[in-house]
Amino acid sequence: MRMLRDMEVFVLAADTGSLSAAARHLDLSPAAASLAVKRLEAEVDAPLFLRTTRSLRLTREGQVFLEPCRQALQVLADGRDAALTGSAALRGILQLSLPSDLGRNVVLNWLDDFQVLHPRIQLRLLLSDRLTDIYRKPVDLALRYGALPDSSLVALPVEPRNRRILCAAPAYLARAGVPAYPEALIDHSCLCFTLGDTVHDRWHFFRDGREVSVQVRGNRVSDDGDAVRRWALAGHGIAYKSTLDVADDLRDGRLVGLCTEWSGELAPLNLICADRRQVSPMVQALRGFLAERCARLLQSIQIKA
């Protein structure tokens, strides 16, 4: 089995261009990953990588050896998946990246229930709104809103019809008034989200085939979706949030939906992975579980899923 592990290190290092990234993904020390490659090189009696202080690339022998390694690992993975499919118990480590707001305030509690159903699954979570580099970071899957930024990634739909919704706290609306239509947002303090260098301050709305785009403004911007939601709850302004993020707040009256005769922008929720071969029975079970919970959450506020 040690040689199979060594092959995993080799293939992942070849895919990421980094031995350190392969080590992190497999929860190994850099020294252990380096030793794994050295054992393989001794086995094939040839160098597999050309190493410099800044780069790692395959030798000619490494290029030849890579595909047989992939095939061997795939055969093992297929056998393991077949065994798991025929078993009542799913098992393994699930390394998952979650968006800050949905992850912390909604999915975290759902995962407690998921582990009750599948107690032999171990969870390793990363909470961040930044799009995780799933090639280099120690995660298998990322739960994210929106279209794929990289067409080489694989998206597993969880809630494809989720939309954004305007919302604010009753205290803010009592103080500043209720906007009757999207264009009225220019007279309000709007709470904006930023991702990377982009501030999402142009909000789009749809009704009867018509689209309205509004350039909003406000004195609070954050790269953390949970911070934007907390500002809205505290009465600091109007937020344009994923309905899944604020469904509980809308249902319980902590936030009020605005301009509800207009549809907000689509914010489809997907599980993202680097390779379709990662879609194991464990991943499929998680996808089905999350899809059911999302549909139930939207139905609780009479929004069709």
Image (tube, rainbow, N blue to C red):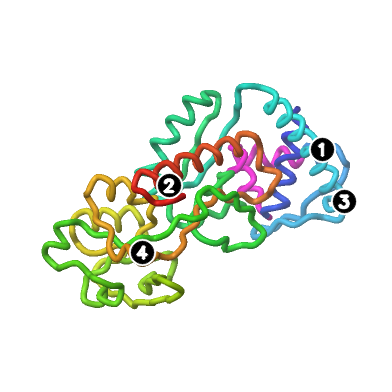
Q: Which amino acid does label 4 sit on?
A: Phe
Q: What residue type is labelled 3?
A: Val
Label 3 neighbourhood size at 10 Å, few (<14), some (14-19), many (20+)?
few
Secondary structure, magenta segment, majority class: helix
Which residue is depicted at the point 57% across and 50% down? 157
Q: Mark 1 points at which residue?
A: 72
Q: Mark 3 points at which residue?
A: 64
141 on left or right of 230: right
Q: How far apart are marks 1 and 4 (CA)?
A: 45 Å
**Magenta stretch, residue numbers:** 17-38
Of 207 and 65, which appears nearest the observer? 207
Q: How far apart are marks 4 and 3 (CA)?
A: 47 Å
Q: What residue type is labelled 2?
A: Leu
Reply yes or no: does residue 25 show up in magenta.
yes
Q: Name the residue under label 4.
A: 193
Q: Mark 2 points at which residue?
A: 127
Residue 176, how many percent across, how many down? 14, 68
Mark 1 element type: helix
Residue 34, how many percent across, how many down? 69, 42
Q: Is residue 42 above or below residue 208?
A: above
Give the number of the disc on residue 216: none
Of 50 and 285, which appears nearest the observer? 285
